[in-house]
């Protein structure tokens, strides 16, 4: 189980830009790593569009946003284009990284799958905040509020 102050598990996953991405490329800045169940579904769209709408402020706070789901890169590309998402989506079709981050489990009536969770990782690769059982509405705002407070430390 991942805890605050623990090292974030590394990953190497294909992105919506067609390239492989790893945790190490975000060294030196905060990473908002959020896990979500499915592209182009109501809650996931709300959450993604929230991050899209505040990405400028999030980047000003020294962070980058990356979303991970088990959807494929083609699905991610369509989702990104449809909603003009301005951040990276990573594909984890085998849910390996999703499971390493403790973001896989029982989703009630939806069965087993990706749980909506967000991790904020600092520039050295340490987990500094975990948002459990995320509500999609206004999640971007609570992340931004945390980042603004963390930047001053």
Image (cartoon, helix red, strand yellow):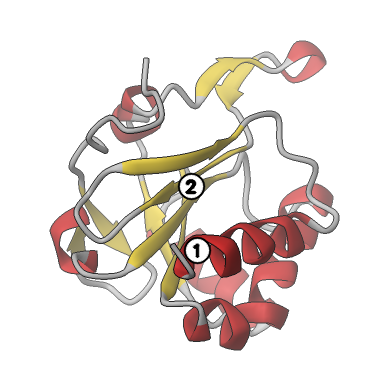
SS for callout 2: loop
Seen at 80% across and 42% down, the residue is 135
SS for callout 1: helix
> For mark 1, does the 10 Å Cα neighbourhood hold few (<14), some (14 to 19), or many (20 or more) residues?
many
Seen at 22% across and 49% down, the residue is 125
Seen at 21% across and 54% down, the residue is 23
Which residue position holds label 1?
76
The quadrant in which residue 50 appears is bottom right
Which residue position holds label 2?
71
Residue 14, percent across and down? 26, 59
Total numbered labels placed on residues in the image:
2
User: Horizontally, is 39 left or right of 45 in the view?
Assistant: left
> For mark 2, does the 10 Å Cα neighbourhood hold few (<14), some (14 to 19), or many (20 or more) residues?
some
Residue 56, percent across and down? 58, 88
Q: Are marks 2 and 1 in contact (CB under 8 Å)?
A: yes
User: Quarter of the image containing the N terminus?
Assistant: top left
């Amino acid at each position: 189980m991942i805890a605050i102050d623990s090292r974030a598990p590394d990953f190497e996953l294909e992105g919506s830009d067609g390239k492989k991405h790893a945790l190490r490329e975000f060294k030196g800045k905060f990473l908002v790593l959020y896990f979500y169940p499915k592209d182009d579904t109501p809650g996931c769209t709300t959450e993604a569009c929230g991050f899209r709408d505040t990405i400028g402020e999030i980047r000003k706070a020294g962070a980058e946003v990356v979303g991970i789901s088990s959807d494929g890169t083609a699905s991610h590309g369509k989702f990104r284009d449809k909603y003009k998402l301005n951040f990276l989506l990573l594909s984890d079709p085998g849910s390996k990284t999703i499971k390493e981050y403790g973001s896989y489990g029982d989703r009630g009536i939806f069965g087993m799958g990706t749980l909506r969770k967000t991790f904020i990782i600092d520039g050295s690769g340490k987990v500094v905040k975990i948002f459990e059982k995320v509500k999609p509405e206004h999640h971007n705002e609570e992340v931004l509020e945390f980042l603004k407070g963390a930047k001053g430390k």
